[in-house]
Amino acid sequence: MDKREFKNKAYNELAKITKALGNPRRMEIIDLLAQGPFSVEKIAEQTNLSVANASQHLQVLKGARLVEISKKGNFIYYQLTNDKVFQAWRALRELGLDLNAEAEKLVNDFYRSGEKMKPVTIEELRQKISGQNVVILDVRPGEEYQRGHIKEAASIPIEDLAERIDELPKGVEIIAYCRGPLCVYADEAVSLLREKGFDARRLKEGFPDWKAMGFPAEIN
Amino acid sequence: MDKREFKNKAYNELAKITKALGNPRRMEIIDLLAQGPFSVEKIAEQTNLSVANASQHLQVLKGARLVEISKKGNFIYYQLTNDKVFQAWRALRELGLDLNAEAEKLVNDFYRSGEKMKPVTIEELRQKISGQNVVILDVRPGEEYQRGHIKEAASIPIEDLAERIDELPKGVEIIAYCRGPLCVYADEAVSLLREKGFDARRLKEGFPDWKAMGFPAEIN
DNA sequence: CAACTATTCAATAAAATAATTGAATAGAGT
DNA sequence: ACTCTATTCAATTATTTTATTGAATAGTTG
């Protein structure tokens, strides 16, 4: 094998993995699987894909070894192969939000306006926790909260928030979080909370980021 | 804009960037540009592409804002937009080498065999430097050495190594490095050196990695 | 201003990717 | 063994990506 041939093979291997990541639907799937394992049907539902289409995308991800499966009863659960997959996805996400003013603007504009609505970073939340009184609110589906959540966080899934909003205190700042910076659950929560007179902001990142940084979490 | 529409846009933006990275030729270009700015002609030459083809790939990278240009005289120099581009490329590279046993095997097999030939990691090199006598040898083209290199490193471009090999000492361990883990210059150097009775190994990573980790370098 | 040259553009053909549909499969539960 | 159901497969079509070729452009140099 000569030099050029070797290089081609090496870069082809890498490109194969990157190509598998480089599709909007599959990126959304990766983002979802960062929360934990899901069945094909659930993945399809969460990403608005047909089951067959979701399955095909999952085959591509599996072919690139980005995800792996485990079987339970009649279901097949897909999960990220290892932590480096999330790390790489995260690096790309950060690069994307950094480079692409368009995308950045999108994230900032959606459901938000003004300084008071600015997302709180993980670092800022850490400081708030140790310094003042805050309520941390997990608005992901209950199932995802069960799997793991920020320590001391309360769980009110976004779809239940309207009717359970009175469980929350009015004098204290509420930090809502969800799956990650591209997830809109926390934005919806903040929007609703502020409408009702609560002092609320969203966490910029999501639970997987918190966990990856090694901060206190309750994991099941 | 509803929730699904927002998500689609956000993931599309990210996928666009990832897609631009997800091509073997463009990956090689990114790897090259991690050394610094190069003209289109030089990039084409180093990657075995036609100039027109290289130019087109560069347009794609520029469209995704991964690279930017600067003009000098008659030439246009391309360079990485910022450090996050290299970080993301690095995360992908690590993920790829980790996931893909094939690729891993390729890298380990090429020009190498046995324990003594195992690449030295940056951490190991750091320890060697502070603890014992080593020669650090930069075998990249002289131009790239000029732009920046590991502190105390000597420069003998791989193409000159055969005739200049007597400049190197025989009692001391020689650590050769080049552009990165996918670059074969250091492997060729080690192969040649060991053939001639020198005690040589390669650095697993490259100069850009060393620099990114903030270790002592001479930059021009 | 003319000549030169680095780079880009435009057009084409070949190849790869993506979504849709409906059928097939495989494995659990009755 | 039969049914039920989650998942995958296969075939089709539309779209996008890639490499090649030769011409065009733009900016410098003499």
Image: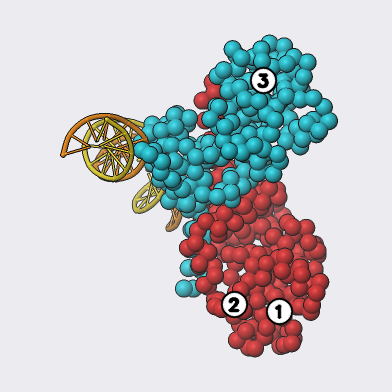
Chain colours: A cyan, B red, C yellow, D orange
Residue B123 at x, y percent in the picture: 72, 65
Chain that bears disc 2: B
Residues at marks 2 and 1, common chain?
yes
The label shown at residue A190 is 3
Asked if one can make out residue B103 in the rendered structure from this viewpoint, the answer is: yes
Reading the chain from its start, which is encountered first: label 2 or label 1? 2
Residue D28 at x, y percent in the picture: 71, 55
Residue at image mark 2: B115
Q: Secondary structure at mark 3?
A: helix
Q: Is residue B27 above or below residue A31?
A: below
Chain that bears disc 3: A
User: In the figure, is residue A201 to the left or right of B181?
Assistant: right
User: In the figure, is residue C4 to the left or right of A12?
Assistant: right
Count how many numbered circles sit on residues in the image: 3
**Camera-side residue of B13 and A217:** A217
Residue at image mark 1: B174
Distance (Cα) linking label 2 and label 3: 57 Å
Asked if one can make out residue B163 in the rendered structure from this viewpoint, the answer is: no
The residue that appears at 54% across and 70% down in the rendered structure is: B108
Q: Is residue A45 above or below residue D7?
A: above
Disc 2 residue type? Glu
Residue B4 at x, y percent in the picture: 51, 25
The residue that appears at 56% across and 78% down in the rendered structure is: B114
Task: Work out which residue is located at the far right of the displayed protein and give it.
Answer: A131
